Structures are given as C-alpha cells and as structure tokens.
Image (cartoon, rainbow, N blue to C red):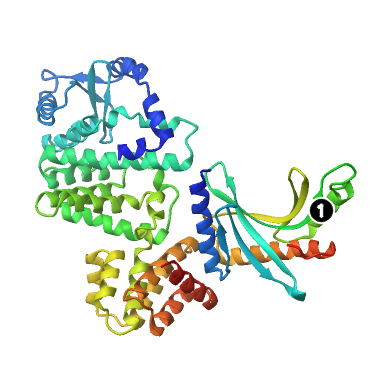
Amino acid sequence: MLASLNSNPKLSKRIAEFRPQQHRNSVRTHLLQSAVRVDERLLPKLARCVKRLHETVGVQDSIETYVYEGSAINAFVTRGRAHLYVALSSGAVNVLTDEELEFVVGHEFGHAVFEHVDVGVGHLLEASDLDPRERMQMFAWKRAAEISADRMGLVCCGSLAIAATAMFKTLSGLNLPGLMIDAQAFSEQWDHLVAEVINCGANDEHWQLTHPFPPLRMKAMQLFAGSQGGTTAGSSDAEVEKLLSMMDPRARESRDSVDPLLADFVLWGGVAVALASGDIGEHERKKLLGISTPENLERALSRNPSQDQAVESFQAALGRRHQQLKSLEIFRIAEALLHIAHADGEMEPAEKDSLVRLLGIMGVGPDACELLMARYQKDR
Amino acid sequence: MEPAEILSVLQQVADVAALAGIRGRVNEERQHFEAGFNLAEGRSQMVYIRVAGKTPDGSTVITFFSPCHVVQKGFLSGITRNQALDLLKRNEQVMFARYGVWSMENSDTIVASCDRLIATLDHKDFYSTVWYVAMAADRFEKEQGSDKF
C-alpha cells in the first residue's frame, strides 16, 4: 500500500518532505508534561507486557511507555528523537486484561514495525495542496495500515477471542468481570453494517475516516486468523481489500470489479438474466461467481428461485435503498448484467427481455437498452 | 487535469448518454463527447460535452455546449455592445441553458451551454439537458439565418 502512495509523484514528494524533527524533539517533553512515564517499579504488569512484546516483535528502537488520562480505551505510538513512545489511555489500562493489553500494545508496535509512524499522515492531510482524490488515497492507506497493525496485535495476543474482547470493550465501554467475546458472533455485526451501508448507498463521509469501521476490523482479523489455518494469506488479503473498498470511493470505481455497494443488484439481476434461458449453465455460473462471492451465490441459489422471484429480490434491493441509484451506478449494474447475458457467447431473446425488464425497473427506457446492448457487442 | 483523467470522465459521460438513449462518441483528439440531434423543420444541431474543471470539493464539472454563431474579430468587427446586451436579455428567457461568448484568437463564438456535476449526473437530466442546449443553440442560429452547427 505504501508503494501505491509513492507511485503518486505528489504524494511521494510530500512523504519525502516530511521532516518530523520538530515533532520528535518535542514529543518527549509533551509526554513527560501531560502523562506518566511507567516502568516496572510503577506499573509492573504493563511494563513487563511492553518489554515482552518489544522483544517478540523485534522493534529496534528503545521504548518508553506512558499512560495518559482518558476514560476511552485508546493508545498511540510515535517516534521521538531517541525512543519509540507507546502511550495508553488510563481507560485502556483500567479496563483491559493483560492479554487484551497485549493486543493493543501489539497493534501499536505493528505501526512501528511496518513503519507507519514514519509516513506522517496527519502532516500530509493538513497539506492544503492535496486534491480530494489524493486525500482519499491517504485515508485509504491509513485504514489499510490499521488492518496491518491489527494483525500484529492478533499475533501478539495469540487469540482471536482476546482481540475480539479488547475491541468489544473499546466499542461498548463495558467492563464486565470475566468478559470473553465470541469472535464469530461479534464479527457478524459486520454483515448487518454491510447491509446498512449498501442500503444507504455511497456515503461521502466514510472515506474520511482514518480507521476502518470496528466490525470491519473484526471481520478482517477473523479472515486473517482463518488464513493461518488453511486458505492462503493472499486470498485473505483479497477479501480484506474488498471489505475496505466499501469505504473507498476510488476502489468502487474500478471497472475490473463489482462495486460492493451494488452487489445485491448485480447478484439478483444476474440470477434473473441467467435463469431467463432456463437453468443456469456452467458459463453463467462462472460469470456469476465473478461478480459475487461463492457464499452469496450459493445462498441465493439455495432457495431455487424462479426468474420472477429473482426479479422480485432485485426490486426488493432497490426498495431497501435509502437513496436513488445514480446513473453511473445503473450503468455499472447494466454492464455486469450484459456480461452475464453474454456468458455463453451470445444473448438469447429471453435474456434480452430479462435485461430490458431489469433496466426498466431502474428507469432505463427500451431504446436506451438497445443502445447499451449494441455498444456492449461493439466493444467486445 | 491529466488527459487520462479527462478521457475517463468523458467515458462516464458516454455511459450516461447511453443510458439516456443518446448516440454519440468520445472524440479523444478534441477531448470532448459529441452527439448530433435532428430538430424540427429538418434542422440539426451538434452538442458537445467537455470537462470544465473541478469544484473546490473535488467534484468534476462538465459543460454541455453547442456553438451557434461565429463572429470574426478585427477592426470594426466582432461582437457589438448591442449584440452582447441581446445575449444577456436572452439568458433571462432561455430555460436550462445560457448563452455566452467563447473568445478565440481570430473569432468569437456564441454558444449555448450548461454545467453539470458528473458524479450526480442523472440520465433523464442528461437527456433534457442536451436537448435544451441543442434547442437554445438552434434557435439563435435560426435567427441568424443559418444551420451550420
């Protein structure tokens, strides 16, 4: 991801220009003034946790640990002139168990190991000459950096349940004795959030968040933990990229993949088009898999829907949207459906009728449908 | 804007045009989208769409435009004060378009035009916009006694 930032000449120049010396000179003074520096004599458990993880993750810099006043569970890491500083809020130290602190401290060490601390995101985002797309790129990088740091936290605490509990406590503010969260159950919140995000349509505010939605982070950790036990890390990365694309308008514009916010339309519309010629053939199934996840496709087909039922589900997805589809979104859906209709090399009249019906539901007239079909065939 | 970004926007314009049922093409060399329209009385009008720039929040602005009259520049020629006032008066009456003057080195071109944001461009709005711009340009051109554009 850092390479992608550096591939933009302007961002690369800004990153290179980042001169953190002034910040590095003053950060220790600031921490010593406003927080407490802790060691084994003051807070032995926390100090030992930091020391143990310091040795485990292989951070070269010497470490100083601080606790600052703040009821929310929070932490940060920053590089100073001579040390790396890890600071935790009093809320984190009061509420989290030793193992949960390992997740949080491990997360912060992740930012150091992966050199996120040297990019100076805050400084770059304050630069007034970045255009909105460059800012989007910076925010997207920052969110991806949080996912990488979470992975380090997970490795450090060694348990998805512990990471989930730390995340759960952070989000809920709960501090129940002996609380241990079922990671699977917690990560299911992501599915509900996805449904909400999809129904709300593109939101201009999501891309401006420096951190991914917490349920997204949980889901990403679950995928990462799963990849350690079987599937490849590469497929986990690809899945996480899809999750993150929900928050990045640039990623959703890519013509090489389906906009996740349009996934329901493309899935149900695709099934309707594929069923138009009878059963779903091998080519059509392959194309449907290209526009959906295997789980979602199986879930849709397990109900053995008729073509009319698929169209109804398509309409239901439209009804759930809190805002109208934009024309560029309609075009992307149309393009994906044309792709399905041409799965076996030619479009049958029934498939064409199905397409006209679906596009008509989205307010596209029959003449425009003909034009879209002609354009698609010409461009193939 | 970089040429590649302009072409990508023009491609989006072509996509929305197709949804609106409007046949046209992206002219890569001239960096605009162009479409021809047949109007009443056997008249015709070309409408072009070009990338105008960006708003302060980064949204891309496109301009629909259709030339309707060219006035050569020079001593005792060019657009007169009265003609300019006439355009201002027309702007008060024309719907969903405006008249303006694009100054070139040797000539002034009177155009009917209208701006839109590409991100929120609706295909039904697109349809009406191209037609209103085409009709506004043709009306002016007809009054000048020509059908060149």
Query: From the viewer's perspective, is B107 left or right of A332?
Result: right
- Res B87 visible: yes
Q: Report the front residue among B130 and B102.
A: B102
Q: Report the front residue among A199 and A295.
A: A295
Q: Name the spot of residue B130 as percent of width and height, x first.
A: 65, 63
Q: Report the front residue among A217 and A284.
A: A284
What residue is pinned by disc 1?
B87
In this rendering, the answer to whether A45 lies above or below A163 is above
In the picture, residue A281 is in which quadrant?
bottom left
* Callout count: 1
Residue at (85% x, 43% y) in the render: B74
Q: In which quadrant is the C terminus of chain A drawn?
A: bottom left
Query: From the viewer's perspective, is A235 left or right of B11?
Result: left
**Could you say whether the residue bearing mark 1 is in a helix, strand or loop?**
helix
Residue at (14% x, 47% y) in the render: A160
Residue type pointed to by label 1: Leu
Q: Name the spot of residue A295 as percent of width and height, x first.
A: 22, 66
Q: In which quadrant is the N terminus of chain A drawn?
A: top left
- Res A362 visible: no
Residue at (78% x, 48% y) in the render: B108
In the picture, residue A139 is in which quadrant?
top left
**Chain label for disc 1:** B
Q: Give neighbour class at mark 1: few <14, some 14-19, many 20+ (Cα, 10 Å).
A: some
Query: From the viewer's perspective, is B18 left or right of B132?
Result: left
Q: Name the spot of residue B9 as percent of width and height, x first.
A: 51, 53
In the picture, residue A26 is in which quadrant?
top left
